[in-house]
Image (tube, rainbow, N blue to C red):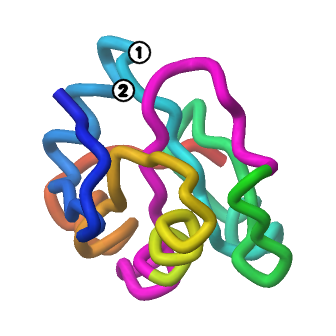
Amino acid sequence: MFRQTKRVESLLAAEIHDMMSRDAITLVDVREPNEFASGHVAKALNFPLSRFDPTALPQTGGPIVLYCAVGKRSAMAAEACRRAEVAIAGHMEGGLSEWTRIGLKLAI
């Protein structure tokens, strides 16, 4: 389903929700810890962009998908992964704004 390309894939919130329900991906939130604590996608891991190290991402649990508040920081983290040659599935287009806009819940 996922292939490493030169371009980072943008995935829709609904697609990610479906993949999460099947435990098919590892979701990584690149927002800062205080943002993560105020609400995040259930089961997401927190790897803040301010100290993001692509080589520290988990290597088990399925392909990695990144997200942030609106998609800008996750795109930056995805680019860092590409430069470090760390394979990821992509990032969430629109971030948590899109997640909540389509009615999906957050964990606190």
Q: Is residue 94 above or below residue 89?
A: below
Q: Farthest residue in the top direction?
A: 22
Residue 30 drawn at (x, y percent): 63, 67
Viewer-proximal residue, 28 or 7?
Answer: 7
Q: Is residue 72 above or below residue 34?
A: below
Q: Amino acid at mark 2?
A: Met
Q: Is residue 26 above or below residue 23?
A: below
Residue at which label 1 appears: 23
Q: Amino acid at mark 1?
A: Asp
Magenta region: which residues? 56-75
79 inside magenta stretch? no
Give neighbour class at mark 1: few <14, some 14-19, many 20+ (Cα, 10 Å).
Answer: few
- Which residue corresponds to the image point at 26% horizontal and 75% vertical from the top-left? 94
Give neighbour class at mark 2: few <14, some 14-19, many 20+ (Cα, 10 Å).
Answer: some
Quarter holding residue 77: bottom right
Q: Would you say the residues marked 2 and 1 are in contact, meaning their CB atoms lie under 8 Å apart? A: yes
Dot 2 falls on a residue whose secondary structure is: helix
Q: In which quadrant will I find the N terminus?
A: top left
Viewer-proximal residue, 88 or 103?
Answer: 88
Q: In this rendering, would 103 be left or right of 96? A: left
Quarter holding residue 99: bottom left
Residue 39 drawn at (x, y percent): 60, 58
Mark 2 and mark 1: span between their CA atoms?
5 Å
Residue at which label 2 appears: 20
Viewer-proximal residue, 57 or 11?
Answer: 57
